Image (tube, coloured by chain):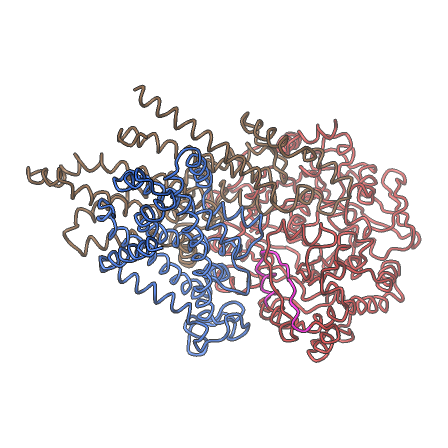
């Protein structure tokens, strides 16, 4: 019955309710540059992809996180060097390697004005941990055995064993604090609406066209955000976004998986272009599980890994943007790629391995999404493997089929596939996907490897000390398995009209928070 | 009068039958699509969650039961709920369909006027081979430029040089009429190219064949001026071929809107639909395809009735 | 047997006759079309880099001595070589689809017009239903169901071009079936097969030919539109639409990626259209004279 009621409550109805509560008016807010009201400081942001997964705890899409980041916040955040900084928690203490005490800020409120209770925080953390939620963040957030209130504003997280990435994991969108009391009584459904403690709140949304985010009057940092309104326009076509930038109708445009964005932007006057450093990385997965896949053969997987020319992938397919990377991006300085067994191109060894596998002339299907960067990488990879006598047949499919064949079906319905992973703020977090049992969604194509599993556990559980050595070993073991093969870091391009926005944070990004620091930014 | 009424009834019945066939095809097509609801709503969710979803959307029931239920809802105006936004689809359509209609209507008017003028001009100048052939060639060229090439060319020119028109910056009429006008010109021009060519060619051909008829010769012999002939004979006789061309062009417009709205980032039905296909938002795809196919069926019905009204000999 | 030889002779003489009546514009169109097709067929033997050879030139190199007539694309491939391959694939896909349409559509149209009754009703209704889906939408649905690729596109083109083919053939058949010689043949007890193949087919051959020309131009359009949306031939194989798709992103910095293939695509569609139009004009005056 409650399920039914939740379902009936449309997002629009919800928005009206929250707007009324916040005392704002429901008027169409998309204004042209010229007609922009003087008093309202409005930032217009054109982005290529729509936000489709609204529940922060289960959202797997970086394109959705971009907007979720503006509406939700977590206990902690990370700074420009990926170090944890206070957010909803003003401070924390590590009482023991398995116990952390967080102190919540005073007077925290959701954007509808209701108070953030300890129960909301505890409930949110436990919701991520609850298997019924189906969050892929259930493991990375840590082996939390207990999350309890301590006094009015204290929250103690007790771990089964030490968990090195706890703080960076808590800084993710997937650890957002939700209004759990409203969620439980059915008046809030996070898959249809957004209600958080972040700097902005949603007041209008037309699917595949635009979002309007208004300043959250109850934001916890006094006097922030400076910007009154962010209009997000969904504009899939790169050139259309560039045209809008150059005629001044948008202030910021972001470019995802558009390798040549800097090139396309280079002759546009009056804009500043930033290619953000990132821990996210493209990878090619080989199916080592499905019986019909040629890549159940470890020598053949290694041969493919050795045929990869990451410099060429970077220079030809990705327009020279990004860095060749192993599973831990160069920004972490955790993995020395020169010491990895299969990282450097070696055609002679690769050919010998192909012969060993008896796979000369073998052809396989390379599954990619209908995205320029992925399709271009696939073609460079195809040329690379042809040099060791393998033939890759590229299949370009749209998102839905790709998700099903790559991530839903078990065993996965592909032989080779190109995708990308977020790198987050800790070198160990994304290595968990190499443990098919714990990660779950990779079980259809990743072969369990006890040594990798052991090293992942060690990397997650070791705080300080030997961690550096363990990370290097883990990096090497993952490289040796040649099952999911990291290629080049995935870097997004952001173009801003010169002088229009000041104070945006330039930093290494691992959570796809494209407008990081927007609450402190000012419009000129 | 009763003749006309009978014609309308016959055509309406035939259209209803076609509509039913269309709805069966749409329903079956959606159910043949790989990847079901659960992979949209809970791509990495546990089994229990997926089963709950199947139950919630009635997907555990036999196909024919689902079909009857779906058709019943459609007939009563309930298009269902989008999987992505979970909002009623009819609401989403309500804001998008008018945009597509506006684009199509403007393109139709523009094409009719410009294409008709070119066609008549080239037909009336059939004694000058150069003028006549250039009219024909212009029509054929316009008909042969795919909309996406034209859109790319416009994007190139108008994003390179500031010429006053905007690309990709859609503004609603109610918000800012001036910006709306500047945003809509290029998409309408893109959609119109085919129509201008089509109407130029059909007008020319029809006018030429009429001009060669004896009674026109007689009219010329009687000393009627070109203008008089144009007023008295041609319009009535053009009507049949124009109705045909309008139907063909309108059929193109609903499909062309998909490409043009995507390239120009216009929040109309076409772009919504292609996005829904990519998102695997089945209820939206189902409803949108049905809506478009139904409008084509109705257009054809209207055309059939018009034929009968214009020229009673065409009644079967 | 002799009946069928004479059928073929009759049809080919009419085709020759129609060809001899083509006007100047149509003949120019025919020559240009042949030149385009020749380029596609001969592309493999031209001294060009392989169409899928990455980094054959510098990325996005403009047309020039070292980078070929149409420059290099975003992966450094030779655009001229890709255009040749693109012409080849675009024509192969659309022509093979239209061949299916012409054969199947002719049979269905003949049967529908000649037999009439329930079969006619069902076939006409089928044509109506399929005709209600705009071409791009139909292609979108089919590629979503069957997965992208050449076969899906062929299937989409067949479905798009089939209803008009059935209608045209059916209408012509209805017209001819009322002619005296057909009625006579029926009265003297000729078999249905004989009537269909000896009396009806030669008389609907020219409408089929004209409609085939239009169908090819529609086929090229559908193929390129679907490839432009990324649903056609799979990379690195090129079709004119897929080259345009890859190039359109770079239109502001490397317009040659769009204008080269765009020119050939427009030329292909234009010449096929003009040829169809010319054929129709050449055939039309003959229509009242039904062949004996």
Residue at the farthest bottom position: A348
Residue at the farthest top position: B2
Residue occupying image coordinates x 73% and y 78%? A352
Residue A388 visible, this orientation: yes
Rendered brown, the chain in question is B
Rendered blue, the chain in question is C
**Foreground residue, B92 or A90?**
B92
Residue range corresponding to the magenta coloring: A360-379
Quarter-of-image position of residue A280: bottom right
Rendered red, the chain in question is A
Residue at the farthest left position: B222
What x and y, as percent, mark residue A373?
Answer: 59, 61
**Foreground residue, A497 or B69?**
B69
Q: In this view, does C84 lie to the left or right of A406?
A: left
Q: Is residue B116 left or right of residue A257?
A: left
The image shows residue A239, relative to residue A353, as above or below, that is above
Residue A14 forms part of the magenta stretch: no
Quadrant location of the C terminus of chain B in the rendered image: top left
**Foreground residue, A132 or B127?**
B127
Q: In this view, does A187 lie to the left or right of C27?
A: right
Residue occupying image coordinates x 26% and y 36%? B239
């Amino acid at each position: 019955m409650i399920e039914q009621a939740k379902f009936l409550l449309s997002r629009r109805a919800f928005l009206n309710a929250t707007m009324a509560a916040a005392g704002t008016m429901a008027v169409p807010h998309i204004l042209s540059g010229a007609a922009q009201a003087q008093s309202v400081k409005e930032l217009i942001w054109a982005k290529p992809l729509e936000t489709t997964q609204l529940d922060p705890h289960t959202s797997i899409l970086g394109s959705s996180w971009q907007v979720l980041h503006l509406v939700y916040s977590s206990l902690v955040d990370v700074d420009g060097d990926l170090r944890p900084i206070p957010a909803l928690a003003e401070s924390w203490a590590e009482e023991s390697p398995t116990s952390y005490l967080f102190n919540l800020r005073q007077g925290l409120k959701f954007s509808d004005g209701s108070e953030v209770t300890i129960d909301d925080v505890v409930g949110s953390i436990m919701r991520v941990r609850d298997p019924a939620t189906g969050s892929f963040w259930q493991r990375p957030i840590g082996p939390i055995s207990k999350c309890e209130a301590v006094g009015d504003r204290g929250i103690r997280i007790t771990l089964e064993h030490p968990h090195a990435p706890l703080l960076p994991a808590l800084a993710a969108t997937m650890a957002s604090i939700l209004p759990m009391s409203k969620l439980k009584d059915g008046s809030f459904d996070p898959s249809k609406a957004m209600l958080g403690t972040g700097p902005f709140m949603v007041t209008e949304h037309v699917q595949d066209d635009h979002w309007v985010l208004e300043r959250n009057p109850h934001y916890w940092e006094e006097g922030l955000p400076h910007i009154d309104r962010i209009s997000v326009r969904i504009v899939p076509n790169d050139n259309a976004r560039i045209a809008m930038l150059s005629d001044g109708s948008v202030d910021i445009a972001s470019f995802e998986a558009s390798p040549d964005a800097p090139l396309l932007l280079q002759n546009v006057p009056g804009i500043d272009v930033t290619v953000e450093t990132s821990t996210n990385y493209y990878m090619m997965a080989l199916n080592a599980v499905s019986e019909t896949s040629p890549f159940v053969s470890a020598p053949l997987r290694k041969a493919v890994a050795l045929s990869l020319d990451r410099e060429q992938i970077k220079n030809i397919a990705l327009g020279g943007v990004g860095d060749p990377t192993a599973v831990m991006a160069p920004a972490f300085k955790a993995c020395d790629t020169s010491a990895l067994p299969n990282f450097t191109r070696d055609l002679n060894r690769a050919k010998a391995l192909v012969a060993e596998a008896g796979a000369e002339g073998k052809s396989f299907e390379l599954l990619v999404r209908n995205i320029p960067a992925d399709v271009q990488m696939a073609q460079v990879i195809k040329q690379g493997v042809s040099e060791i006598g393998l033939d890759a047949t590229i299949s370009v499919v749209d998102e839905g089929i790709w998700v099903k064949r790559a991530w839903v079906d078990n065993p996965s319905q592909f032989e080779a596939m190109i995708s990308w992973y977020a790198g987050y703020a800790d070198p160990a977090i994304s290595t968990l996907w190499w443990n098919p049992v714990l990660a779950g969604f990779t079980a259809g194509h990743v072969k369990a490897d006890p040594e990798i599993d052991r090293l992942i556990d060690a990397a997650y559980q070791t705080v300080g000390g030997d961690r550096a050595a363990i990370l290097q070993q883990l990096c090497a073991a993952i490289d040796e398995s040649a099952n999911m093969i990291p290629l080049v870091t995935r870097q997004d391009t952001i173009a801003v009209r010169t002088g229009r926005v000041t104070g945006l944070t330039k930093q290494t990004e691992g959570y796809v928070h494209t407008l990081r620091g927007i609450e402190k930014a000012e419009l000129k | 009068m009763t003749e006309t009424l009978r014609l309308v009834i016959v055509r309406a019945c035939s259209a209803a039958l076609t509509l039913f066939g269309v709805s069966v095809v749409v329903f079956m097509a959606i159910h043949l699509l790989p990847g079901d609801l659960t992979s949209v709503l809970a791509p990495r969710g546990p089994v229990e969650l997926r089963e709950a979803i199947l139950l919630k959307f009635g997907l555990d029931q036999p196909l024919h039961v689902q079909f009857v239920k779906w058709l019943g809802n459609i007939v009563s105006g309930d298009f269902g709920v989008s999987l992505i936004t979970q909002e009623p689809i009819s609401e989403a359509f309500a804001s998008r369909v008018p945009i597509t209609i506006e684009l199509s209507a403007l393109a139709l008017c523009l094409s009719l006027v410009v294409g008709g003028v070119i066609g008549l001009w080239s037909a009336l100048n059939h004694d000058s081979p150069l003028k006549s052939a250039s009219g024909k060639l212009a029509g054929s060229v316009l008909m042969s430029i795919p909309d996406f090439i034209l859109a790319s060319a416009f994007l190139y020119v108008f994003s390179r040089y500031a010429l006053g028109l905007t690309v990709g910056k859609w503004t609603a009429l109610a918000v800012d009429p001036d910006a709306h006008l500047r945003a809509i010109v290029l998409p309408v021009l893109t959609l119109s190219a085919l129509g201008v060519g089509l109407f130029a060619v059909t007008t020319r051909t029809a006018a030429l064949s009429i001009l060669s008829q004896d009674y026109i010769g007689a009219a010329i012999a009687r000393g009627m001026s070109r203008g008089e002939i144009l007023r008295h004979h041609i319009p009535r006789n053009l009507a049949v071929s124009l109705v045909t061309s309008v139907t063909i062009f309108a059929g193109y417009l609903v499909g062309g809107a998909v490409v043009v709205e995507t390239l120009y980032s216009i929040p109309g039905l076409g772009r919504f639909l292609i996005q829904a296909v990519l998102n695997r938002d089945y209820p939206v795809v189902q409803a949108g395809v049905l809506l478009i196919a139904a409008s084509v069926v109705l257009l054809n019905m209207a055309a059939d009735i018009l034929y009968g009204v214009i020229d009673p000999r065409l009644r079967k | 047997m002799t009946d069928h030889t004479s059928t073929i002779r009759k049809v080919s003489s009419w085709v020759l006759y129609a060809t001899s009546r083509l006007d100047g514009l149509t003949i120019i169109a025919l020559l240009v079309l042949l030149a385009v097709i020749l380029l596609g067929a001969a592309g493999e033997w031209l001294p060009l880099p392989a169409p899928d050879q990455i980094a054959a030139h510098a990325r996005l190199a403009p047309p020039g001595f070292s980078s070929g007539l149409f420059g290099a694309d975003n992966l450094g491939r030779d655009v001229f070589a890709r255009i040749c391959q693109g012409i080849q694939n675009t024509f192969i896909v659309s022509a093979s689809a239209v061949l299916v349409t012409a054969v199947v559509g002719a049979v269905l149209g003949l049967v529908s017009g000649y037999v009439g009754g329930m079969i006619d009703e069902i076939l006409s209704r089928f044509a109506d239903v399929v005709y209600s889906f705009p071409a791009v939408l139909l292609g979108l649905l089919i590629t979503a169901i069957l997965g992208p690729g050449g076969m899906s596109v062929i299937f989409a083109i067949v479905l798009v071009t089939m209803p008009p083919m059935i209608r045209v053939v059916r209408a012509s058949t209805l017209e001819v079936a009322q002619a005296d010689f057909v009625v006579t043949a029926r009265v003297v007890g000729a078999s249905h097969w004989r009537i269909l193949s000896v009396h009806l087919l030669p008389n609907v051959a020219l409408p089929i030919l004209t409609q085939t020309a239009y169908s090819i131009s529609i086929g090229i359009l559908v193929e390129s539109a679907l490839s432009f949306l990324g649903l056609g031939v799979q990379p690195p194989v090129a079709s004119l639409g897929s080259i345009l798709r890859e190039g359109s992103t770079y239109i502001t910095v490397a317009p040659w990626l769009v204008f080269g293939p765009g020119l050939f695509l427009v030329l292909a569609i234009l010449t096929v259209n003009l040829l169809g139009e010319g054929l129709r004009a050449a055939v039309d005056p003959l229509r009242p004279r039904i062949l004996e």
